[in-house]
């Protein structure tokens, strides 16, 4: 089976997933999107309202900022694979529960296996604590973490930079570090 086919099958599985209660309230699953041979994978927290309506990741305000950060290092959205820890929207955008994260973990792990990106960028505390541990972002952002067979990179979630503008420059600087590594 080709990697594209494997990824398509996985996304079909996500579309019918009932492993947690979020499938009841969601409008659409949001598995993620991007090329199967992407060098860079970006992982957020969970879909919001716009993503839930469209079935596409990071299409709201956070997504706009992400697109700007990517273009700042010479990449476009279509170059990277974008997804989140959860593939369904939690009601009222509440923080994902431990149980929901565990129910969804397998899907992200499979995406990472199939795409095998050079770097997996973890956007924000939920992505970081779910994948590599409870690191404080203020101390760990801008750093790489070797975990098993994959390299992770830690930065803030774009929503943090929308709420607190000082994080915008911090994220810009983090993305510059990322750019050097991708060369
Ligand atoms: N925030 C996320 O973490 N993921 C999305 O898809 C949208 C907003």
Image: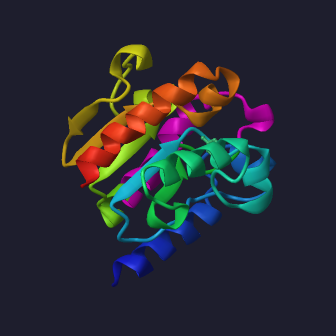
Q: Is residue 131 visible?
A: no
Query: Which residue is rendered at x = 35% and y = 70% of the image?
Result: 37
Query: Which residue is rendered at x = 66% and y = 48% of the image?
Result: 64
Instruction: Tell me which image quadrant ligand 1 sits in.
Output: top right
Q: Camera-side residue: 183 or 20?
A: 183
Residue 152 at x, y = what percent? 30, 40
Q: Is residue 105 magenta?
A: yes
Query: Quadrant where the N terminus lies?
Result: bottom left
Residue 24 at x, y = what percent? 77, 49
Q: Is residue 92 magenta?
A: yes
Residue 47 at x, y = what percent? 67, 46
Query: Quadrant where the C terminus lies?
Result: bottom left
User: Is 53 located above or below residue 134 in the figure?
Assistant: below
When asked about the image quadrant of residue 94, the answer is top right
Number of callouts: 0
Question: Outermost residue toward the bottom?
Answer: 1
Query: Which residue is rendered at x = 76% and y = 61% of the image?
Result: 54
Left of 88 or right of it: where is 41?
A: left
For the magenta stretch, what is the residue range? 90-111
Q: Camera-side residue: 50 or 78?
A: 78
When asked about the image quadrant of residue 90, the answer is top right
Q: In this figure, which colouring scheme has been used for the structure?
A: rainbow
Query: Which residue is rendered at x = 70% and y = 54% of the image?
Result: 59
Residue 61 at x, y = what percent? 72, 43
């Amino acid at each position: 089976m080709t990697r594209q086919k494997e990824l398509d099958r996985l996304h079909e599985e996500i579309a019918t997933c009932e492993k947690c209660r979020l499938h009841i309230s969601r409008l659409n699953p949001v598995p993620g999107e991007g090329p199967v041979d992407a060098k860079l994978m970006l992982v957020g927290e969970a879909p919001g309202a716009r993503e839930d309506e469209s079935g596409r990741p990071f299409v709201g305000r956070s997504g706009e900022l992400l697109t700007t950060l990517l273009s700042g290092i010479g990449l476009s959205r279509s170059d990277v694979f974008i997804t989140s820890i959860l593939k369904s929207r939690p009601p009222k955008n509440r923080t994902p529960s431990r149980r929901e994260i565990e129910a969804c973990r397998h899907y992200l792990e499979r995406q990472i296996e199939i795409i095998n990106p050079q770097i997996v960028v973890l956007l924000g505390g939920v992505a970081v604590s779910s994948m590599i541990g409870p690191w404080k972002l203020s101390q760990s952002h801008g750093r790489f973490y070797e975990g098993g067979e994959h390299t992770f990179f830690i930065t803030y979630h774009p929503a943090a930079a929308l709420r607190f503008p000082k994080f915008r420059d911090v994220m810009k600087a983090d993305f510059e570090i990322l750019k050097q590594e991708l060369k």
